[in-house]
Image (cartoon, rainbow, N blue to C red):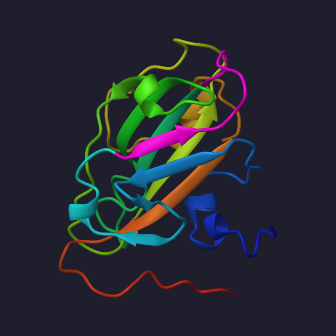
C-alpha cells in the first residue's frame, strides 16, 4: 500500500504517534461484534469494556506488547496530554490474544469531552517475556520513546478508531494534499 493511501498516514497516526513501519503480524481488535478498522467511528458507550484483541504470529515463544493511546487528549486542537495511555498489555504470546498477556496498566475507557479523538492500538514484538514494564504516568506517554526504552524496534502492527462524545456529530475531516 502506498504511503499516500495508507489510512495510518492519512489519519496522521504515522507522524503524530509512529514512524513509518511495515506491518508484519496480524492484529484484530473487537468491541463486542464490531471490529476496529482504521478511521471507524465508535461512541464512548461502545468502548466501555476492554476490547478483545487477537495477535497473529506463529511461535508461542514470541511475545508482544500492546499499547493503546490517545494522541488527541484532552482535545485535538490542544493535545497537551499527548499521548494519553489507555491500556498496556505485555507478554502476549503469538497466536493468542491480550487475555493471555499481562495487563500491565488496566484498561481505561475513552471519554472524550471535545472533538474527535483517535484511539491507537500499537503492537510491538518484545525481546522476551518480562522485559517491558508500566510507566509511572498515563498522560504525556510517548510511544516512540517507550519502544526505544525497551528495545522494541518498529511496530509490527497498528490500527486506530475515532471516538467523540456521545452527543457529538460529524466525522474527522481528512485533507489530502
Is residue 62 inside the magenta stretch?
yes
Where does the image place residue 13, in percent across and percent down from the top left? 57, 61
| Residue 161 vs residue 75, the one in the foreground | 161
Picture quadrant of residue 168? bottom left
**Residue at far front of view:** 33
Quick check: 119 above or below 69? below
Is residue 88 inside the magenta stretch?
no
Q: In this orientation, does residue 148 appear?
A: yes
Q: How many marks are shown on the rendered structure?
A: 0
Picture quadrant of residue 126? top right
For the point 45% across and 32% down, which residue is it? Answer: 98
**Residue at far right of view:** 2
* Highlighted range, magenta: 51-63
In the figure, is residue 163 to the left or right of 157?
Answer: left
Quick check: 39 above or below 66? below
Where does the image place residue 156, in percent across and percent down from the top left? 68, 41
| Residue 172 vs residue 31, the one in the foreground | 31
Quick check: 124 above or below 17? above
For the point 41% across and 33% down, which residue is it? Answer: 88
For the point 52% across and 11% down, which residue is it? Answer: 130
Picture quadrant of residue 95? top right
Q: In this orientation, does residue 17 appear?
A: no
Figure quadrant of the N terminus = bottom right
Where does the image place residue 76, in percent across and percent down from the top left? 37, 70
Figure quadrant of the C terminus = bottom right
In the figure, is residue 18 to the left or right of 78?
Answer: right
| Residue 21 vs residue 61, the one in the foreground | 61
For the point 27% across and 62% down, which residue is it? Answer: 46
Where does the image place residue 77, in percent across and percent down from the top left? 36, 73
Magenta stretch, main secondary structure class: loop
Amino acid at each position: 500500500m502506498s504511503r499516500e493511501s495508507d489510512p495510518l498516514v492519512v489519519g496522521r497516526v504515522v507522524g503524530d504517534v509512529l514512524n513509518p513501519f511495515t506491518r508484519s503480524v496480524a492484529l484484530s481488535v473487537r468491541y463486542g461484534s464490531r471490529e476496529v478498522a482504521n478511521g471507524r467511528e465508535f461512541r464512548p458507550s461502545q468502548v466501555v469494556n476492554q476490547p478483545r484483541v487477537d495477535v497473529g504470529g506463529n511461535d508461542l515463544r514470541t511475545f508482544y506488547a500492546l499499547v493503546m493511546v490517545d494522541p488527541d487528549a484532552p482535545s485535538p486542537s490542544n493535545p497537551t496530554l499527548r499521548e494519553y495511555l489507555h491500556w498496556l498489555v505485555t507478554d502476549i504470546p503469538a497466536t493468542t490474544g491480550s487475555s493471555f498477556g499481562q495487563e500491565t496498566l488496566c484498561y481505561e475507557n475513552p471519554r472524550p469531552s471535545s472533538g474527535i479523538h483517535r484511539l491507537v492500538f500499537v503492537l510491538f514484538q518484545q525481546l522476551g517475556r518480562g522485559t517491558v514494564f508500566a510507566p509511572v504516568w498515563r498522560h504525556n506517554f510517548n510511544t516512540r520513546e517507550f519502544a526505544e526504552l525497551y528495545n522494541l524496534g518498529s511496530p509490527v502492527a497498528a490500527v486506530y478508531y475515532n471516538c467523540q462524545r456521545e452527543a457529538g456529530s460529524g466525522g474527522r475531516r481528512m485533507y489530502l494534499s
